[in-house]
Amino acid sequence: LAGGLAASIWQPSQPIMTAAISMIFQRQEPINPKRVLGVVIAFFGCLTMVFMSSTTTTSVEGSSSSSSSSRSTASFLAGNFLFFINCLSTSLYVIFSKHVVGLYPPILVTAWSYNIGAVFMALTAFLASLFPQTVMAFICEECVHDHDHTTETTAAEATAAIHCSKY
């Protein structure tokens, strides 16, 4: 949706979000002007890089139709929103797990975290399987338009289709 460049820009924002949340909401970190300025500069630096990468990507791809351009913009914004949610969730996990690890053994906290994540992944996979064409169009617009076949129903079929399309 947003691409690898956006991912590489968003991932370093996790410590920024963690520091901001710790300073503002948790009061775990002392607030001083240098820290606030550092968080603000880093946040706007990441934001600038994300939106500058969109203009670079758009100019390289050279989309000619307006519907394709609006779809690319919507996909770009959706992808960056999902990266933001990912980074925010990871920051919140780091903050809240600190308290939980004080109460329970770290291996238990890790096991429960992975199990809860697996339940959410299974739920997401199930919901995605209900509307495979819509989900595929959202994730990879080119994949839907480039192929005349229906979406594969098993993981083996999907893997084979991806492998065959590379050659």
Image: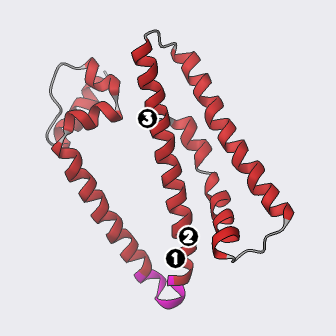
Q: Amino acid at mark 1?
A: Ser
Magenta span: predominant SS is: helix
Residue 79: percent from left, percent from top: 46, 39
**Which residue reaches farthest top?**
64
CA gap, disc 1 and disc 2: 5 Å
Numbered disc 1: secondary structure: helix
The image's mark for residue 97 is 1
Quick check: 52 left or right of 40?
left
At 46% from the left edge and 9% from the top edge, which residue is drawn? 64
Q: Are marks 3 and 1 in contact (CB under 8 Å)?
A: no
Q: Earlier in the sequence, mark 3 or mark 1?
A: 3
**Which residue reaches farthest front?**
25
At 24% from the left edge and 51% from the top edge, which residue is drawn? 125
The residue labelled by disc 2 is 94
Quick check: 60 left or right of 142?
right
Q: Is residue 92 above or below residue 4?
A: below
Numbered disc 2: secondary structure: helix
At 52% from the left edge and 62% from the top edge, which residue is drawn? 90
Which contiguous range is marked in magenta? 100-108
At 22% from the left edge and 50% from the top edge, which residue is drawn? 127
Q: Amino acid at mark 2?
A: Val
Residue 94: percent from left, percent from top: 56, 70
Is residue 166 in view? Answer: no
Q: Residues within 10 Å of mark 1 (few under 14, many from 20)?
A: some
Q: Is residue 131 above or below residue 108?
A: above
Q: Amino acid at mark 3?
A: Leu
Q: Is residue 137 above or below residue 130?
A: above
Q: Residues within 10 Å of mark 2 (few under 14, many from 20)?
A: some
Q: Earlier in the sequence, mark 2 or mark 3?
A: 3
Q: Are marks 1 and 2 in contact (CB under 8 Å)?
A: yes
- Which quadrant is the N terminus positioned in? top left
The image's mark for residue 1 is 3
